[in-house]
Amino acid sequence: MLSEQMSPVFSFKTEWGWCAAQVSVEGIRRFALPMSSPTEVVEVLKGREKVSSGRSVFEPHCTGCGGTGGEEGRLTQLSNRLIDEVRAYFEGRLRVFSVPLDLAGASDFRRRVWEALIEISFGQTVTYGELARQVGGSARAIGGAVGANPLPLLVPCHRVLAAGGGLCGFSAPGGIAVKKRLLEFEGVAYD
Protein backbone atom coordinates (compact mmCIF):
# COMPACT_ATOMS: atom_id res chain seq x y z
CA MET A 1 0.00 0.00 0.00
CA LEU A 2 1.24 3.46 -0.90
CA SER A 3 1.65 6.05 1.82
CA GLU A 4 0.08 9.48 1.90
CA GLN A 5 3.32 11.17 0.86
CA MET A 6 2.66 14.40 -1.00
CA SER A 7 4.82 16.76 -2.99
CA PRO A 8 5.24 20.29 -1.76
CA VAL A 9 2.95 22.74 -3.51
CA PHE A 10 4.81 23.76 -6.66
CA SER A 11 4.23 26.23 -9.45
CA PHE A 12 5.16 26.22 -13.11
CA LYS A 13 4.87 28.65 -16.00
CA THR A 14 2.54 28.14 -18.97
CA GLU A 15 1.58 30.28 -21.95
CA TRP A 16 -1.35 31.59 -19.87
CA GLY A 17 0.58 32.31 -16.67
CA TRP A 18 1.65 30.45 -13.54
CA CYS A 19 -0.17 27.29 -12.42
CA ALA A 20 0.28 25.45 -9.13
CA ALA A 21 -0.32 21.89 -8.05
CA GLN A 22 0.15 19.32 -5.36
CA VAL A 23 0.67 15.67 -6.13
CA SER A 24 0.31 12.46 -4.12
CA VAL A 25 1.64 9.06 -5.13
CA GLU A 26 -1.89 8.30 -6.39
CA GLY A 27 -2.12 11.30 -8.72
CA ILE A 28 -2.77 15.03 -8.85
CA ARG A 29 -4.46 16.10 -5.61
CA ARG A 30 -4.93 19.86 -6.15
CA PHE A 31 -4.47 22.26 -9.06
CA ALA A 32 -4.76 26.02 -9.54
CA LEU A 33 -5.46 27.73 -12.85
CA PRO A 34 -2.96 30.25 -14.28
CA MET A 35 -2.33 33.52 -12.49
CA SER A 36 0.18 36.32 -13.01
CA SER A 37 2.81 35.28 -10.46
CA PRO A 38 4.11 32.07 -8.89
CA THR A 39 3.64 33.43 -5.37
CA GLU A 40 0.02 34.39 -6.05
CA VAL A 41 -0.94 31.02 -7.53
CA VAL A 42 0.77 29.07 -4.73
CA GLU A 43 -1.06 31.18 -2.13
CA VAL A 44 -4.36 30.43 -3.86
CA LEU A 45 -3.67 26.70 -3.91
CA LYS A 46 -2.61 26.70 -0.28
CA GLY A 47 -5.83 28.46 0.66
CA ARG A 48 -4.21 31.83 1.26
CA GLU A 49 -1.66 30.49 3.73
CA LYS A 50 1.53 32.48 3.98
CA VAL A 51 4.08 31.17 1.48
CA SER A 52 7.48 30.48 3.00
CA SER A 53 10.55 32.22 1.65
CA GLY A 54 11.64 28.92 0.12
CA ARG A 55 9.11 28.91 -2.71
CA SER A 56 8.31 25.58 -4.27
CA VAL A 57 8.80 26.72 -7.85
CA PHE A 58 10.27 24.23 -10.27
CA GLU A 59 11.25 25.23 -13.77
CA PRO A 60 11.08 23.63 -16.23
CA HIS A 61 10.18 20.46 -14.37
CA CYS A 62 9.51 19.51 -10.78
CA THR A 63 13.07 18.69 -9.81
CA GLY A 64 12.43 19.36 -6.14
CA CYS A 65 9.57 16.90 -5.67
CA GLY A 66 11.80 14.02 -4.72
CA GLY A 67 14.34 11.53 -5.93
CA THR A 68 14.15 9.07 -8.79
CA GLY A 69 13.10 5.95 -6.90
CA GLY A 70 10.15 4.80 -4.81
CA GLU A 71 7.44 7.21 -3.76
CA GLU A 72 9.62 10.29 -4.28
CA GLY A 73 10.31 9.18 -7.84
CA ARG A 74 6.57 8.68 -8.40
CA LEU A 75 5.86 12.24 -7.17
CA THR A 76 8.47 13.63 -9.57
CA GLN A 77 7.14 11.56 -12.47
CA LEU A 78 3.52 12.64 -11.91
CA SER A 79 4.51 16.27 -11.40
CA ASN A 80 6.48 16.38 -14.64
CA ARG A 81 3.69 14.64 -16.54
CA LEU A 82 1.19 17.20 -15.23
CA ILE A 83 3.45 20.09 -16.23
CA ASP A 84 3.88 18.68 -19.74
CA GLU A 85 0.15 18.07 -20.21
CA VAL A 86 -1.01 21.45 -18.87
CA ARG A 87 1.52 23.29 -21.02
CA ALA A 88 0.41 21.29 -24.07
CA TYR A 89 -3.24 22.16 -23.33
CA PHE A 90 -2.55 25.90 -23.13
CA GLU A 91 -0.46 25.69 -26.32
CA GLY A 92 -3.42 24.06 -28.13
CA ARG A 93 -1.68 20.68 -28.51
CA LEU A 94 -3.71 18.61 -26.00
CA ARG A 95 -7.44 18.13 -25.55
CA VAL A 96 -7.64 15.20 -23.13
CA PHE A 97 -5.65 14.92 -19.90
CA SER A 98 -4.32 11.48 -19.03
CA VAL A 99 -2.40 12.23 -15.83
CA PRO A 100 -3.95 10.29 -12.91
CA LEU A 101 -6.01 12.23 -10.39
CA ASP A 102 -6.22 11.62 -6.65
CA LEU A 103 -9.81 12.17 -5.51
CA ALA A 104 -9.17 10.77 -2.02
CA GLY A 105 -11.36 12.28 0.65
CA ALA A 106 -14.18 13.19 -1.72
CA SER A 107 -17.67 11.99 -0.92
CA ASP A 108 -19.19 9.38 -3.24
CA PHE A 109 -21.51 12.05 -4.64
CA ARG A 110 -18.70 14.50 -5.41
CA ARG A 111 -16.61 11.74 -6.92
CA ARG A 112 -19.50 10.79 -9.24
CA VAL A 113 -19.98 14.42 -10.28
CA TRP A 114 -16.25 14.97 -10.90
CA GLU A 115 -15.99 11.72 -12.88
CA ALA A 116 -18.94 12.87 -15.01
CA LEU A 117 -17.16 16.21 -15.60
CA ILE A 118 -14.06 14.37 -16.83
CA GLU A 119 -16.20 12.77 -19.54
CA ILE A 120 -17.19 16.16 -21.02
CA SER A 121 -15.07 16.54 -24.14
CA PHE A 122 -13.00 19.56 -25.12
CA GLY A 123 -15.31 22.08 -26.77
CA GLN A 124 -18.50 20.54 -25.32
CA THR A 125 -20.70 21.67 -22.44
CA VAL A 126 -23.51 20.37 -20.25
CA THR A 127 -25.91 22.14 -17.92
CA TYR A 128 -26.21 21.64 -14.18
CA GLY A 129 -29.61 20.08 -14.81
CA GLU A 130 -28.21 17.60 -17.35
CA LEU A 131 -25.53 16.59 -14.86
CA ALA A 132 -28.18 16.19 -12.15
CA ARG A 133 -30.16 13.81 -14.37
CA GLN A 134 -27.01 11.88 -15.26
CA VAL A 135 -25.50 11.60 -11.77
CA GLY A 136 -28.57 11.95 -9.57
CA GLY A 137 -29.33 14.77 -7.19
CA SER A 138 -30.50 18.31 -7.70
CA ALA A 139 -28.93 20.95 -9.91
CA ARG A 140 -28.10 22.87 -6.71
CA ALA A 141 -26.26 19.83 -5.27
CA ILE A 142 -24.39 19.47 -8.56
CA GLY A 143 -23.41 23.13 -8.32
CA GLY A 144 -22.02 22.55 -4.84
CA ALA A 145 -19.92 19.62 -6.03
CA VAL A 146 -18.72 21.51 -9.10
CA GLY A 147 -17.79 24.51 -6.93
CA ALA A 148 -15.78 22.28 -4.59
CA ASN A 149 -13.68 20.83 -7.42
CA PRO A 150 -10.00 20.91 -6.33
CA LEU A 151 -8.78 20.19 -9.87
CA PRO A 152 -10.18 22.84 -12.24
CA LEU A 153 -9.20 22.26 -15.88
CA LEU A 154 -8.23 18.63 -15.18
CA VAL A 155 -11.79 18.05 -13.97
CA PRO A 156 -13.29 20.54 -16.43
CA CYS A 157 -15.88 22.36 -14.34
CA HIS A 158 -15.67 25.32 -16.75
CA ARG A 159 -17.71 23.20 -19.20
CA VAL A 160 -20.85 23.34 -17.03
CA LEU A 161 -23.41 26.02 -17.92
CA ALA A 162 -26.70 27.23 -16.55
CA ALA A 163 -29.99 26.15 -18.10
CA GLY A 164 -30.27 27.76 -21.50
CA GLY A 165 -26.51 27.81 -21.99
CA GLY A 166 -25.69 30.84 -19.85
CA LEU A 167 -22.64 31.43 -17.72
CA CYS A 168 -23.62 31.35 -14.07
CA GLY A 169 -20.49 31.28 -12.00
CA PHE A 170 -17.02 29.89 -11.60
CA SER A 171 -15.41 29.31 -8.22
CA ALA A 172 -11.79 29.56 -9.38
CA PRO A 173 -9.97 32.88 -8.93
CA GLY A 174 -10.89 35.20 -11.77
CA GLY A 175 -14.44 33.86 -11.80
CA ILE A 176 -16.58 34.21 -14.91
CA ALA A 177 -13.81 35.97 -16.88
CA VAL A 178 -11.59 32.87 -16.58
CA LYS A 179 -14.49 30.55 -17.44
CA LYS A 180 -15.26 32.64 -20.55
CA ARG A 181 -11.62 32.59 -21.62
CA LEU A 182 -11.39 28.80 -21.25
CA LEU A 183 -14.65 28.23 -23.14
CA GLU A 184 -13.63 30.60 -25.94
CA PHE A 185 -10.24 28.85 -26.15
CA GLU A 186 -12.13 25.58 -26.63
CA GLY A 187 -14.40 27.13 -29.28
CA VAL A 188 -17.59 27.00 -27.22
CA ALA A 189 -20.50 29.32 -27.95
CA TYR A 190 -22.53 30.34 -24.92
CA ASP A 191 -25.32 32.80 -24.09
Image (cartoon, rainbow, N blue to C red):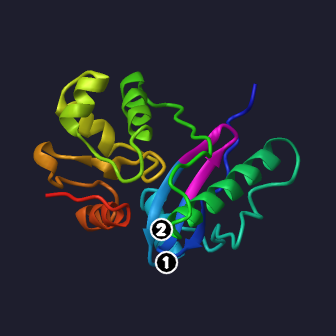
Disc 2 target residue: 41
> In which quadrant is the C terminus drawn?
bottom left
Identify the residue at the far right of this view.
69
Chief secondary structure of the magenta portion: strand
The residue lying at 66 percent from left, 37 percent from top is: 26
The residue lying at 50 percent from left, 54 percent from top is: 95
Contact, mark 2 vs mark 1 (Cβ under 8 Å):
yes
Disc 1 marks a residue whose amino acid type is Ser
Which residue is nearer to you in this view: 127 or 59? 127
Query: Any magenta on residue 119?
Result: no
Left or right of 132 in this view: 182: right
Left or right of 68 in this view: 4: left
The residue lying at 23 percent from left, 59 percent from top is: 189
Instruction: Tell me the element at label 2.
Output: helix
The residue lying at 52 percent from left, 35 percent from top is: 103
Residue 69: percent from left, percent from top: 88, 46
Q: Residues within 10 Å of mark 1 (few under 14, many from 20)?
A: some
The residue segment tinted magenta is 21-29
Left or right of 160 in this view: 121: right
Residue 66: percent from left, percent from top: 79, 55
Q: CA distance from mark 2 to mark 1?
A: 6 Å
> In which quadrant is the N terminus drawn?
top right
Residue 129: percent from left, percent from top: 18, 33
Disc 1 target residue: 37
Disc 2 marks a residue whose amino acid type is Val
Answer whether residue 50 is visible to the viewer in this image: no
Q: Residues within 10 Å of mark 2 (few under 14, many from 20)?
A: many
**On screen, residue 42 above or below 102:** below
Residue 56: percent from left, percent from top: 65, 67
Residue 45 is labelled as: none
Answer whether residue 142 is visible to the viewer in this image: yes
